[in-house]
Amino acid sequence: MKRVIVDMDGVMADVYHQLVQFEKRDSGKEIEIRGLAGMPEIDAFPNGKKHIHEVGFFRTLPVIEGSKAALEYINSKYDLYVVSAGMEFPNSLREKFDWLAEHFPFISWEQIVLCGSKKVIHGDIMIDDYPKNLDHFAGEKFIFTQPHNELIENAAYKRVHSWEEIMSIL
Amino acid sequence: MKRVIVDMDGVMADVYHQLVQFEKRDSGKEIEIRGLAGMPEIDAFPNGKKHIHEVGFFRTLPVIEGSKAALEYINSKYDLYVVSAGMEFPNSLREKFDWLAEHFPFISWEQIVLCGSKKVIHGDIMIDDYPKNLDHFAGEKFIFTQPHNELIENAAYKRVHSWEEIMSIL
């Protein structure tokens, strides 16, 4: 059974949507996501650096469209692991665990990895929005489109724009 | 540079010592560690199952003798990762992070992995006290002696009894 490694932020959880909402709440600024192509994710928001350290930020992230149904299917057909670089934000560790338990109850604790670097992770397929994670992976690399990676053209990755598209491949 | 994967509980952190202390505190029973060879770790203590879920259990674990100096050395010579199956105890996630920051400040957040199953972990050498973790590992396997694994004889593992012994090999 092939092992599929799936990232959380920007793949299962909608970080941009949350940053837009928090920015509007705090500064009144309405940031247009379509204008952020190619910009570093957090720097695209005036208060982004503050917001990602806020208690509750990761716990209340919206679920990315189509991810629940797709991951329930992938979980039945593949050896699925959710791997998130949560160690950078220690507050997020428990929040990420609780978020997964709420939205993806079919994913067991055995299938969850919260790490720093993803260099130690081994599998057949990785779905991630960051080249820094995909580049060290020995298997097949799917880059999940998010504004910060939109302008990257690299034949080493297969670009996927939605969970619907992933479902049609896996 | 070879990658070394080191477990926390039973390798860096002294779980038996903590279970003995907590048992004494709660029931007055003084459990002799030398009588526990071959028994499952938690079952060897009347209140073990309760204690490992107690807030603060993992945060206050004593450091295993010799592990600080040895890991500081290993960290300078190898690509070191600390990999702990903390996901079974969600309370332990932040506690383990804070425990490492206190006792092993030279280990950065990039080098920490809190997971469920260790099947996804890839490296050259794994130091762990549990066969279930070592058995899926593709590299060299060191079993760190703890009472629960003392009676296991398996040529697939190199048995190490102390950090002093590990230092003499690595």
Image (cartoon, coloured by chain):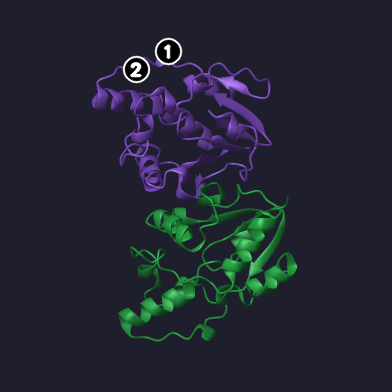
Chain colours: A purple, B green
Q: Nearer the viewer, residue B72 or B50?
A: B72
Q: Residues within 10 Å of mark 2 (few under 14, many from 20)?
A: some
Identity of the residue drawn at 50% across and 31% down? A73
Q: Nearer the viewer, residue A144 or A110?
A: A144
Chain name for mark 2 = A
Asked whether, in this view, residue B147 is left or right of residue B79, the answer is left
Asked whether, in this view, residue A18 is left or right of residue A163, the answer is left
Q: Is residue B105 visible?
A: yes
Label 1 secondary element: helix
Q: Residues within 10 Å of mark 1 (few under 14, many from 20)?
A: few
Q: In the picture shown, does residue B54 fall above or below A71? A: below
Q: Amino acid at mark 2?
A: Ile
Asked whether, in this view, residue B157 is left or right of residue A95, the answer is right
Q: Amino acid at mark 1?
A: Gly
Mark 1 vs 2: CB contact within 8 A: yes
Q: In the picture shown, does residue B6 fall above or below A14? A: below
Identity of the residue drawn at 51% across and 58% down? B105
Identity of the residue drawn at 63% across and 71% down? B163
Could you say which quadrant of the image residue A170 lies in? top right
| Co-location on one chain, circles 1 and 2 | yes
Chain name for mark 1 = A
Q: Nearer the viewer, residue A129 or A25?
A: A25
* Residue topped by disc 2: A31
What is the x, y in percent for residue A20?
33, 23
Q: Nearer the viewer, residue A52 or B139?
A: A52
Label 2 secondary element: loop
* Residue topped by disc 1: A35
Identity of the residue drawn at 42% across and 64% down? B58
- The numbered disc on residue B158 is none
Asked whether, in this view, residue A14 is left or right of residue B157, the answer is left
Q: What is the C-alpha distance between the residues marked 1 and 2?
A: 8 Å
Q: Is residue B131 visible?
A: no
